[in-house]
Image (tube, grey):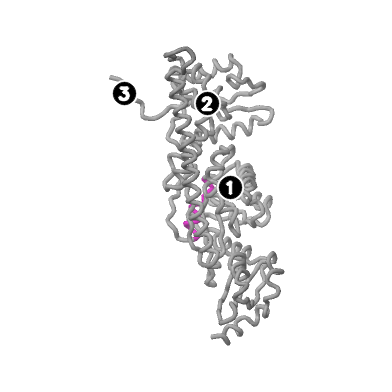
Amino acid sequence: MSTLRETERVFLVGVASEDLRKPEARELLDELHGLAQTLGLETVGEILIQLRDTTPSLLVGTGKAEELAEAADQAGADSIIFDHILSPVQQRNWEKLSSKKVYDRAELIIKIFASRALTKEASLQVELAQLQYTLPRLAHSYDDLMRQRGGRYGTKGSGEQKLELDRREIERRIHEIKDELESVRKERSVQKRRRERAGVPRAAIVGYTNAGKSSLLNALTAASVHAENTLFATLDPTTRRLLFAQGQTLLLTDTVGFIRNLPHGLVEAFRSTLEEASQADLLIHVADASDVHVDAHIATTLQVLCEIGANDVPRILVLNKIDLAERDAAEAFLLRYPGSVAVSAKTGQGLDGLVEAIQEALTRGMKTYVLRIPHADYSIASLVMREGTVLEEHHDDESTWLHCRIPGRIEKKVQPYIVDAAGMGAGIFSAKE
């Protein structure tokens, strides 16, 4: 009686090319190893190849393909994972050649996301990415059925009928998920408007996966967000309040981690989640001080921020895990990125300095005013609550009075409503009591 192997054994293939030099390809292959480990896969072998000319059928030449298939077979692998995009045709041909499951980095990441999704929204987003990735690859699941033709001349075989039925079902489910996600986005929009009315500034923690974002959120807010030393430990955004010593409040949100070559479908599927970054007043960009590839990780994060329209949001670069880094390396990093802050979410080192930097960034360029806004122009009060910080608020029969700090970008809009500058605020509001 045969025993099913519990752990999938994988053979990894890294690909260097003219556009991707061997050192970077090696880094990505090492990262692919970490991704496989995150999913609980056992890596039994790996190889880095130099791709000179691509072929539409197998990506590499037939001879090299047979050599790789033999190496994977000798290693006892169940699957082959390429650190390079495979077209549906290439994936199908590789599975025929090797008699093994074959997939690429994008599918591996989607599998990880599927295993990590906990909330309804994350599950829907991952399912959407899976279906959009699967749809063009559906045919390779029915190679045998496609040859089962029957009935009158010109009629479709059972395999083709099955394929069309499944394609229609997937397209229907994709449409259904998009509708469900739209409902989630509307609910998120309502929550956002509530936060705006409260006048509380918002910051989002962003960065490469496993940089310590959740650990930093826990350290700053005494939260209990799941955090572990693994890739994509959490997918769902978590928001907690950070209370400053002066009594001010900041809403701090942890977001999904980024990674090089993140599948486009996942960026699209998680766009509503990533909106937390694009709509924030401040980004806290966390980088891992102990990772030798930290500069590449920073570049990847900046690229994704640009893709989601968050590249113009003010940000603080935070070098985390400083307790694990070599002192010279940390000092060199701080010199390369002036204004960055070195911290350890684990030991608490540097957190006070980070809080001060956050406060300074939120108030940078803001001016304090007392505004008298007629009720007929209450949209201006809403603007101030959304874009600035309301220190005090008072209402009378004719107007809304706000003692507030506002950024320069809305100063012209509130100019007609300015009563006095900061120094008079307390006296005016005391007189109104």
> Within 10 Å of the Cα at label 1, are there few (<14), some (14-19), or many (20+) other Cα atoms?
few
Q: Return the residue nearer the eye: 294 or 39.
A: 39
The kind of residue on which mark 2 rests is: Glu
Residue to which mark 2 is pinned: 46
Residue located farthest toward the top when viewing the structure as drawn: 153
- Total numbered badges shown on the rendered structure: 3
Identify which residue is drawn at 43% across, 15% down. 148
Query: Which numbered mark, 1 or 2, is in the foreground of this view?
Result: 2
Q: Secondary structure at mark 2?
A: strand
The answer to which of 194 and 362 lies nearer the viewer is 194
Label 2 crowding class (10 Å Cα cut-off): few <14, some 14-19, many 20+?
A: many
In this rendering, the answer to whether 91 lies above or below 210 is: above
Query: Farthest residue toward the bottom?
Result: 431
In this rendering, position of residue 142 left or right of residue 334: left
Element assignment for label 3? loop
Determine if the magenta segment contains residue 178. no
Overall secondary structure of the magenta section: helix
- C-alpha gap between disc 1 and disc 2: 29 Å
The span picked out in magenta is: 210-220
Residue 139 locus on image (x, y percent): 49, 24
Q: What residue is shown at x 56% (from left), y 82% (from top)?
A: 397
Question: In this figure, which residue is indicated by the disc labeled 3?
Answer: 3
